[in-house]
Amino acid sequence: MTGYFITLEGGEGAGKTSALYTLAKRLKKMGYDVIATREPGGIEIAEKIRQVILDPDHTEMDGRTEALLYAAARRQHLVERIIPALQNGQIVLCDRFIDSSLAYQGYARGLGMDEVYAINQFAIQDKMPDLTLLLDIEPEKGLQRIADNQSRERNRLDMEKISFHQQVYEAYQQLKDKFPTRIRTIQANQDKEKVEAAAMDAILSLIKE
């Protein structure tokens, strides 16, 4: 039995991380075998790459270097954790995957979505999510959430100008139109409970199919 690969996407402050762990807990209570993980990271090698990518001191990092590091972390995470879990019939909930690279490096960094997609095709060998939940929130509101949350990890991407985050938002709008059968949009600018309920409905619809 093959499991289900489900990713959560969205701009900074969309609430992906908290939603992911709540969804994982609820699915486990329902009897499903679930793992929750993140990108970049999820395993030791990828977490070390994450530290390099998101270090606030690494402001000189070139956009192509950034894209390649994300793809490298993704490859190792995929072969070491995601694929084995899917082969065991587990549900994998992952905070970010290839769509983040397309939005952040491909579009917002100006490297080109097709070019970044090509890099990632080499890394993932056509292993795409079964379902992607796009937590949709305007960049200004997402960044305000970050500013209000003193306990949240601050990273290099949080330091980007608002214009960068607006481009990320635009990219996600394009991606949901490009992959309408895979990407399910969830309005993130509403109560946390409503966001999680909509996400759970989408996941259960996939499983029951």
Image: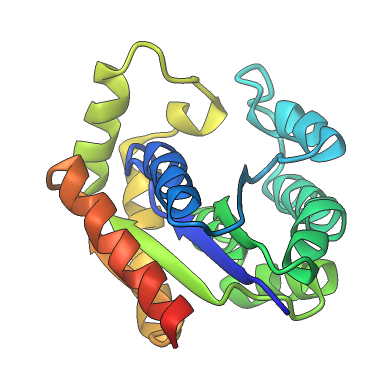
Position of residue 88 in the picture relative to residue 97 (left or right):
right
Left/right of residue 61 with respect to residue 141 in the rendered view = right
Quarter of the N terminus within the rendering? bottom right
Q: Is residue 110 above or below residue 3?
A: above
Which residue occupies the foreground of this view, 14 or 32? 32
Q: Residue at x 52, y 53 (%)?
A: 104
Q: Is residue 136 visible?
A: yes
Residue lying furthest left in this view?
190
Residue 99 location, x and y as percent?
Answer: 54, 64
Residue 35 is left or right of residue 47, and the answer is: left
The x and y percentages for residue 122 are 84, 73
| Front one among 130 and 114 | 130
Q: Picture quarter containing residue 112?
A: bottom right
Name the residue rendered at 49%, 20% in the picture: 154
Q: In this orientation, which residue lies closer to the viewer: 16 or 140? A: 16
Residue 137: tell me if it is visible. Answer: no
Residue 37 image offset from top left, x and y in percent = 63, 45
- For image coordinates 50% across by 50% down, the residue present is 28
Q: Residue furthest top?
A: 150
Query: Does residue 137 appear to the left or right of 8 in the view shown?
Result: left
- Specify the quadrant that holds the C terminus: bottom left
Residue for point 22% across, 28% down:
144
Q: Quadrant of residue 25?
A: top left
Please provide percent x and percent y for residue 96: 55, 53
